[in-house]
Amino acid sequence: MELLHRPLARRGGRPKEEERNSVSEPKNKQDETTSRERALIAARAADEKKATDIMVQEVRDLIGVTDYFVIATAANNRQVEAIVDEIEEAERVQGHCKPLHREGTQDGTWSLLDYGDIVVHVFQPETREYYRLEALWNDAPVIDLAKEAGLTELEYSDRIAKLLGKA
């Protein structure tokens, strides 16, 4: 699986701490959004494009390089691209930020948006099953998307439903 890396901001790996904590300058205090709010924006955008198995994990205390993982599943490579594009647009409009970089596989089985404080992963089912990121960081608190994002009709596979205690 060959990864494509498309830097969008600075070059040279992970963003510096000050860049990670302020992905863009808000126009005014009303425009400020928190990491958690941006993670919820990404989850809602993924749902708009019919992603399944959407979950948000708060990983800041476990890995230290980001605050939240947003993980979603897409049925095919076109849907992966559509979901990532929708998230990028929603974050630009609602979260007032652009990704530091975007990367993924050539065959479209996985794509990633790195905003510094949130990292979005969109997988096709087989690739998500292979990497099992949500299980790797299973000590991380999972955000209740029905309660916090108003997403009450999310579709979950048996494995993810069990992990979330919804099975």
Image (cartoon, grey):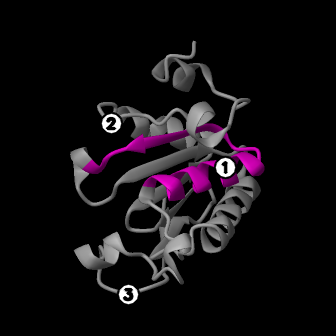
Name the residue carrying label 1.
44
Label 3 environment density (alpha carbons within 10 Å; few <14, some 14–19, many ≥20): few
Name the residue carrying label 2.
140
Name the residue carrying label 3.
10
Please name the amino acid that badge 3 sits on: Arg
- Helix, strand or loop at label 1? It is helix
- Helix, strand or loop at label 3? It is loop
Asked if residue 22 lies left or right of residue 97, the reply is: left
> Which region shows up in magenta?
36-60
Q: Nearer the viewer, residue 1 or 80?
A: 80
Identify the mark nearer the N-term, 1 or 3: 3
Residue 67 position by quadrant: bottom left
- Residue 135 shows up from this direction: yes
Q: Which residue lies furthest to the front in this view?
A: 29
Q: Residue at x 60, y 55 (%)?
A: 41
Q: Please say if 158 is above or below 109.
A: above
Q: Which residue is drawn at 46% across and 52% down?
A: 36
Measured as percent of width and height from the top left, residue 81 is found at 69, 62
Q: Please say if 38 is above or below 6.
A: above
Please name the amino acid that badge 2 sits on: Ala
Residues under numbered marks 1 and 3 in contact, where contact means CB atoms less than 8 Å apart: no
